[in-house]
Amino acid sequence: MSFSGPIEDRLAIREVIEQYADAVMQRDAVAWAGVWAEDSEWRLPEYPGLECFRGRDEIVAGWIRSMGDYPGLAYIATPGAIQVDGDRATARTYTSEVFPHPDGRVLRLRGQYDDELVRIGGRWLFTKRVYKTIRAD
């Protein structure tokens, strides 16, 4: 996978990824909800109880619950690939997270999202995000 498709679309998709990250940092559920299509899917298969959420309402409710477990979370996201094909796109997004663990340690996670997006009403939205941990320190 690489970067392909119209630059305007790739830029708009980068902005969706950046809005997602900014909403996490700001703990802004409204902004975070704004990056998801109504019938989307969010998968975190490595995290018991968070394996799969379907539909924007369930996704946002799950995110709100899970954010309570991560006070002080710092989250950065960087696209590694974006491929646009008409009104559909795929992307690979790398993440870096730092947060305090309840036992006093500071955890540092590096992860990867495999993303699917669709253009609806002129806006790009996630239809599917699947996360996997690359490294945990």
Image (cartoon, rainbow, N blue to C red):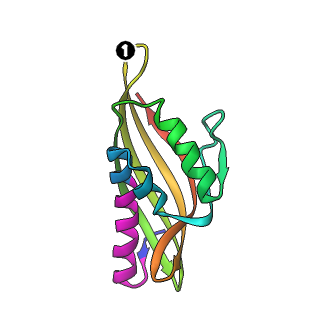
- Looking at the rendered structure, the secondary structure element under dot 1 is loop
Residue 122 is situated, as x and y percent measured from the top left of the image, at 45, 83
Identify the residue at horizontal 64%, vertical 42% (top origin).
Answer: 45
Question: What is the magenta segment's predominant secondary structure?
Answer: helix
Q: Nearer the viewer, residue 116 or 65?
A: 65
In the rendered view of the protein, which quadrant contains the C terminus? Answer: top left
Assess whether residue 6 is covered by the magenta stretch.
Answer: yes
Q: Quadrant of residue 38?
A: bottom right
Identify the residue at horizontal 50%, vertical 42% (top origin).
Answer: 64
* View extreme (top): residue: 103
Q: Nearer the viewer, residue 74 or 30?
A: 30
Q: Quadrant of residue 41?
A: bottom right
In the image, is residue 19 above or below residue 122? above
Residue 133 is situated, as x and y percent measured from the top left of the image, at 51, 40
Residue denoted by label 1: 104
Identify the residue at horizontal 65%, vertical 50% (top origin).
Answer: 53
Identify the residue at horizontal 34%, vertical 82% (top origin).
Answer: 8
- Magenta range: 4-20
Locate residue 10 relative to residue 132 in the image: left or right.
left
Q: Nearer the viewer, residue 77 or 29?
A: 29
Residue 124 is situated, as x and y percent measured from the top left of the image, at 46, 74
In the image, is residue 8 above or below residue 129? below
Assess whether residue 33 is covered by the magenta stretch.
Answer: no
Residue 42 visible somewhere in the drawing: no
Give amino acid for label 1.
Answer: Gly
Q: Residues within 10 Å of mark 1 (few under 14, many from 20)?
A: few
Residue 9 is situated, as x and y percent measured from the top left of the image, at 40, 80
Residue 97 visible somewhere in the drawing: yes
In the image, is residue 136 above or below residue 117? above
Locate residue 43 relative to residue 11 in the image: left or right.
right
